[in-house]
Amino acid sequence: MTSPLLSIHDHVWPYIEKINLATLPWYGKDAQEYFAELGFAPRLHYHGPVEIKGDALRMGFYIVIMDYVDSTGALPPEQMEDHHIDNIREVAKLLQAGRWPWLHGDLRPENVVFRPGQKLQILDWDWAGKDGGLIDPRYPPTLNDCSIVPRHPRARAKGDIRTSHDIWHLNRMLLLAKREALEGPEDINFTSLQ
């Protein structure tokens, strides 16, 4: 009888040079797949349990296998190209579309790769989901202090994640690049652009 769990040897080994691999308790699989289809995220190869020598890895956790995004030569937000500005505006529209819009939850510049001549790539879909959907994504209890890692003013450990928080981060990147901010669902006060 074949196990329904993924065999790490058969499925991971062929991709070992081309993928990122992570084990997580939650992952925004549907959100990443949607944005990957539009070219804004790495393609997801697998999301689910994994079996290593007959034992499930970290019961309750998932393994995520996706294309590797090379950040060598990536530009900081201050140096992003004009097409990256257009990408940010397109991502903002996609995030705000529909009755239950998508959200990423952690759209800090560290999770967005700006490569010269290429579409921006959004990484780290751990907290992604639907804003106002059946299950509201929440920040983890170990969320970094907002005074250390700039975040939306309403971002709190165990608090609801909202699409407006992602728009805040996109606006922050535009302002770092000295570009006009997006029109968002709420007024945004950037007291620090460090």
Image: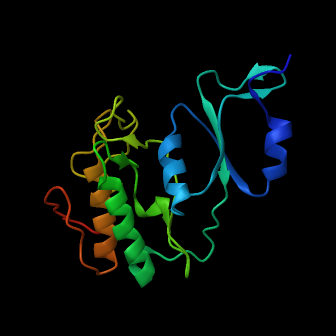
Pick the front one: 93 or 183: 93
- Placement of 153 over or under 4, stated as above or below: below
Residue 181 in the image: state x and y as whole percent.
Answer: 24, 72
Closer-to-camera residue (63/45):
45
To which quarter of the image does residue 132 belong?
Answer: top left
In the displayed structure, 53 sits above or below 114; it is above
- Quadrant in which residue 74 is drawn: bottom right
In the image, taking residue 111 as reference, residue 48 lies left or right, namely right
Residue at the spot 55% in from the left edge and 57% down from the top edge: 37
Name the side, left or right, on which 46 lies relative to 194. Answer: right
Quarter containing the N terminus: top right
Q: Residue at x 48, y 59 (%)?
A: 111
Which residue is outermost to the top?
1
Answer left or right for 46 relative to 117: right
Image coordinates for residue 67, horizontal then vertical, percent: 67, 56
Q: Give the position of the C terminus as an image quadrant.
A: bottom left
Residue 121 spot, x, y in % from top left: 52, 64
Is residue 160 placed above or below 168 in the rendered structure?
A: above
Residue beneath the point at 37% across and 48% down: 103
Q: Which residue is drawn at 28% across and 43% down?
A: 99
**Which one is in front, 46 or 64?**
46
